[in-house]
Amino acid sequence: MSDLIYYSTNTFLAFNISQRYYNGLHFVWVTPYFEMWGQTQTYTVPATSSPKEIYRSLKREIYGSDRHGTQIDANKVGLKNGASFKRAANVITESEKNDIFSIVDSADRSLFRPLLYVIPYDRVINLVKEVPVNERANPLSVEFRIELLPKSAFDVIELE
């Protein structure tokens, strides 16, 4: 399994908050499948967990000026929940938590542009945790979490 790659789509804003406030450690949901399940015998991931589909959806919301999309709003909630969690764990101060909330609230939509994380399996073998079935987008999907992913363990790609 040492030749596997994990993929995750996150926002430019999430990346920068993690770099600046969380000592360069990132919380990510990952899958070894870039695309969602196709017409194969093995189920991979549904659209809501597919790095490719998440990337496309974020891009459509930003560049299509879609004010009814759900990805940016979901990312805002996730960033605020993450800041609250980091505050409760004493990773950040109350002031830093408030700064993150202000950044998220005042961020221009362009700061939510998608970034693709490409994560070699052998760099995170001891960090990967399987997502419990009841938390997956589909009970058959292949999903993992990495709670403290260092920047040195992955590459960031911005697709055209």
Image: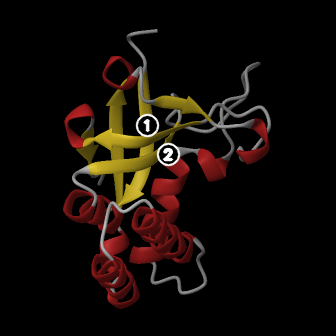
Q: Residue at x 80, y 37 (%)?
A: 139
Above/below status of 145 relative to 85 = above
Q: Which residue bears the numbered disc 1?
A: 7
Q: Is residue 50 placed above or below 59 in the rendered structure?
A: above
Callout 1 crowding tier (Cα within 10 Å): few <14, some 14–19, many ≥20 = many
Which is nearer the N-term, disc 1 or disc 2? 1
* Spot occupied by residue 116 in the image (x, y as percentages of width and height): 35, 47
Which amino acid lies under the numbered mark 2 shown in the image of this protein?
Answer: Pro
Could you classify mark 2 by the number of other residues whose Cα lies within 10 Å: few (under 14), some (14-19), or many (20 or more)?
many
| Cβ atoms under marks 1 and 2 closer than 8 Å | yes
**Is 142 rendered above or below residue 87?**
above
Q: Which residue is mark 2?
A: 51
Q: Nearer the viewer, residue 110 or 28?
A: 28
Residue lying at 47% horizontally and 71% vertically, measured from the top left: 84
In percent of width and height, residue 53 lies at 55, 51
Tag 1, which secondary structure? Answer: strand
**Three-letter residue code for mark 1:** Tyr
The span from disc 1 to disc 2 (Cα, nearest Å) is: 6 Å
